[in-house]
Amino acid sequence: METRVIRVGPGDADLERIREAAAVIDGGGLVAFPTETVYGIACRAKVESISRLDALKGGRSDKAYTLHISDRSLVGFYVPTVGLRARKLVERAWPGPLTIVFELSSADMDKQRSGLETDVFECLYRDGSIGIRCPDNAIASLLLRAAAHSVVAPSANVSAEAPAVDGAGVLAQLSGRIDVVLDGGPCKYGQSSTVVRVTGAGLEVLRSGVYSAGELEEISRVQFLFVCTGNTCRSPMAEGMFTKYLSEKLGCNVDQLEKMGYKACSAGTIDVGGFPASPEAVRVCASKGIDISAHRSRGLSEQLVRDSDIIFAMCGMHRERVVGLDSEAAEKCVLLAGDVDIPDPIGQPQEVYERCADLIEQAVKRRIGELVI
């Protein structure tokens, strides 16, 4: 077999030739193509095609090949439930040099098994998980978009050889063994994508690459923000309770929460800082096993709003203030207690604080129950 070489650029002028290569993939062929990391071998997720890829790569692997998608919005088609940290990686690192291994629940696996063609399901999922990559390369995106079927793509190399980083490198290893090489020139990074598994216990880097473990930890950290007026009563109580119950959900100690990738903080719409939580708030939290004695108030800021992923306001005017600072926060800011305002207990007797704390505690538990970790 002679391998056809198609030299292409990222512009529309080469779109027809890219579509020709996509048709080869849909027909069961193997097509090498550039990504920003290394060249990959595109293969339709179909048993016959995968068997040919297995033979090329040196035998059947116990791991499924990585699915490649043209747009990050497509992840929901393959992973029905995406956890908070995984979603942040999708939003901030895709398209880009990162392969994410998603773990699926039994219910989601059953849903995918019944909703996808048998061939596609068997090719993409293994041991309750699926690896997905969304490359940041225009040629790769156009090729994946043009293909009519799901596409997997391991690196373009034979066993024990380094992945090819340009068209010539592909031909040196695979000439006569694949159908087409889309030669888009050298790859940007010239090294493999980082592979990370996301679990409830945190991130596990399975293969080092462009992204470091530290960078992925920073990118995927989820921050919760609680907002009231002065940041001395309601929001400090909510922050303390949320930290306690989220730690329990994750099965870790409170002081390990940030290492698990989650952070809770609070602020007030009055721009003053440095004040401790009210004595009444400290007492009522202590009665629930929560220590907020070290809390110091701070004012709400535009940067804090932007840095936070989920924002819980104590009442409607607090939400209005948040959205006033950043209109894009409207989608991530909600009232903590649903459609109910949590009244301010400031200056009231201890029993008022206790009723307020009970309302906050109920709302916090409900919100944590809704979180997909």
Image (cartoon, rainbow, N blue to C red):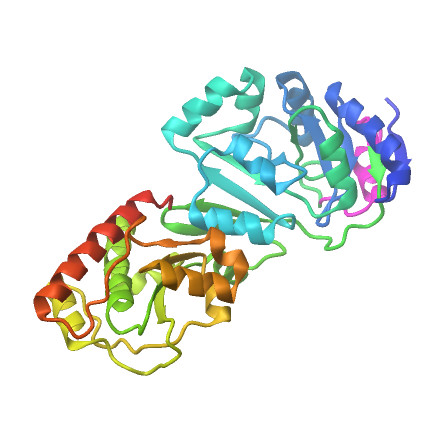
Instruction: Find out whether residue 270 is within the magenta segment.
Output: no
Residue furthest to the bottom in view is: 274
Whether residue 53 is situated above or below residue 75 in the rendered picture: above
Q: Nearer the viewer, residue 208 or 90?
A: 90
Q: Residues in magenta?
A: 163-180
In the image, what residue occupies the spot 43% across and 34% down?
104
Quadrant in which residue 239 is drawn: bottom left
What is the quadrant of the N terminus in the image? top right
Quadrant in which residue 321 is drawn: bottom left
In the image, what residue occupies the spot 51% across and 28% down?
125
Would residue 85 appear left or right of 91 to someone viewing this image? left
Whether residue 330 is situated above or below residue 33 in the rendered picture: below
Q: Nearer the viewer, residue 126 or 117?
A: 117
Residue furthest to the front in view is: 317
Would residue 329 appear left or right of 296 to someone viewing this image? right
Instruction: Find out whether residue 177 is within the magenta segment.
Output: yes
In the image, what residue occupies the spot 63% across and 20% down?
46
Could you tell me residue 213's position as x and y percent? 51, 58
Whether residue 211 is situated above or below residue 284 in the rendered picture: above
Could you tell me residue 276's position as x and y percent? 25, 80
Q: Is residue 216 visible?
A: no
Could you tell me residue 70's position as x and y percent? 68, 38
Could you tell me residue 69's position as x and y percent? 64, 36
Whether residue 269 is situated above or below residue 180 in the rendered picture: below
Would residue 227 appear left or right of 346 to someone viewing this image? right
Q: Nearer the viewer, residue 54 or 212?
A: 212
Q: Nearer the viewer, residue 50 or 89?
A: 89
Quadrant in which residue 83 is drawn: top left
Would residue 234 appear left or right of 309 to someone viewing this image? left
